[in-house]
Amino acid sequence: MLRKIRITLAAISFVLITLLFLDFTGALHAWFGWLAKIQLFPALLAMNFGVVIGLAVVTLLLGRVYCSVICPLGVFQDVISWFSGQRKGKSRRFGYSGESKWLRYGVLGVFILAIIFGADALVALLAPYSSYGRIAQNLFAPIYQWGNNLLAFISERIGSYAFYTKDVWIKSLPTFIIAAVTFVALFILAWRNGRTYCNTICPVGTVLSFLSRFSMFRPVIDKSKCKSCHSCEKECKAACIDIDGKSIDYSRCVDCFDCIDNCKYGAIKYGFAYGRTAKMKAKAEHENKADRSRRAFLTSSALALGAITIGAQEKKIDGGLAAIQDKKVPERKMPLVPFGAISLKHFRDHCTGCQLCVSVCPNGVLRPSTDLEHLMQPEMSYERGYCRPECVKCSQVCPAGAIMEITPEEKTAIHIGTAAVDYDLCVVNRDNVSCGNCARHCPVGAIRMVKKNPDDKDSLRIPTVIEDRCIGCGACENLCPSRPYSAIHVDGLQIHKID
């Protein structure tokens, strides 16, 4: 029964979190966005200590149920492992293996140091929720969107517009490659060895393991009933059951309850672990180990909290049926980060690179950075669209506090960048034609058209930017007819200004 409950809850959680990354309309976030905000590492970065304390209490009570129910990367590995186990002759393929302490604590140490020294790319690479987010956004979302586009094509042919087409494109080749490599590595590990990644590499799993050693409820082996058949050991995807020693490594147990269902002698029960007999056993076998674990937990927790505190595309044609040349990304003096990010530093310090904001951006403005230092963290660019004043979806879905939630009214008072004109690229100068596209579409009236030659009453007009008004939305850059580079582009502000 416990196993069925766990599988049901895990399946619901996994499907809903995956849909958060697939749903490009952002409609699901109003109902299920909280599932992203209860992920441990994003909650820590957002200083959401209510969630952090809640997860810690749950782990102390029930063990690592977070890893088996809430974490999408953990459940994803279970799905792969289950399919592997359905092969003929491949059931009971696991076995006990000792804890790889040097690897577990080594990776956790590297992770904490990466947070302290601002190695954002490494932090994003190791964080489990972010890893799954990249896989879902880069590998699963395009398939979902192609399916949507097929339905849009069919519905249009029968006179229905229930679906609309969505551009499918690679937003960042390096991030796509990292997502693909992560997927392949996880697939191989889970296919062959179940939860190897969770118990050797995942820093969140290692942190929770300090608490799960002392969980109040846990699977317990009844030595008087155990026949040493090794059935539970061979079904344990965490490789944490040592039947010869009649012991379970609770630091690695993810409370999947497979062992309980597979023991035909009823020798494993899930129950309160601190009765008189259990206390005597624990005192005899784990006294020194517990002391070391407590010290390790306190040290790692202090370091972690300190570190967190510190630290196929559609071809476009114009009216004359001539192909429009794609725009190229301009060189910006300072990267652009979303409205609500407060500052470039705040955004970099809190962003986990999970790509959730990239998934819901309706205008193709957000895409993962290709800068090595901040690889996979989103940036804004305006080749495919601009940041519309009424859209605040990215601020509504960010689970880590990198983008603070704002309203459309608040957004119009925030300045994230300033437009700058390159008059050599402006079609007024280059082609001697009248334009003014940037001024017509600026939502805040920050661009004025002035005479190119003040002494000539018939002079063509060129744009000039009123910097105090410009909010950095990119409408001017996106709608500028100059190709391949826009004659006007936006440079980001290191600290966002608010009127």
Image (cartoon, helix red, strand yellow):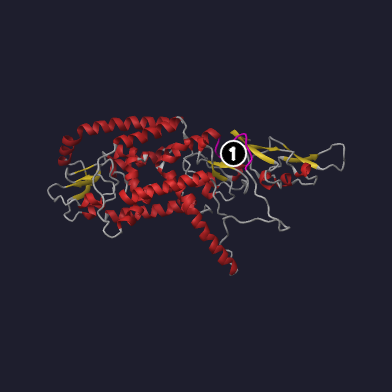
Under circle 1, the secondary element is loop
Q: Residue 149's spot in the image, x, y percent?
A: 55, 60
Quadrant of the rendered structure where residue 275 is?
top left
- Residue 333 located within the stretch drawn in magenta: yes
Q: Residue 203's spot in the image, x, y percent?
A: 37, 38
What residue lies at 59% left-to-right and 46% top-to-bottom? Answer: 365
In the drawing, does residue 332 fall left or right of residue 20?
right
Query: Is any atom of residue 443 visible in this view?
Result: no
Dot 1 alpha-carbon crowd within 10 angstroms: few under 14, some 14 to 19, many 20 or more: many
In the drawing, does residue 389 fall left or right of residue 188?
right
The rendered magenta stretch, by its main secondary structure, is classed as loop
Outermost residue toward the left? 224
Quadrant of the rendered structure where residue 60 is?
top left
Question: Mark 1 belongs to which amino acid?
Answer: Leu
What residue lies at 32% left-to-right and 47% top-to-bottom? Answer: 195
Give the camera-side residue of 102 and 416.
102
What residue lies at 26% left-to-right and 31% top-to-bottom? Answer: 292
Q: How many marks?
A: 1
Q: Residue 77's spot in the image, x, y percent?
A: 36, 50
Q: Which residues are magenta?
A: 329-343
In the drawing, does residue 177 fall left or right of residue 66?
right
Residue to which mark 1 is pinned: 336
Quarter of the image that includes the C terminus: top right
Query: Is any atom of residue 489 visible in this view?
Result: yes
- Residue 308 located within the stretch drawn in magenta: no
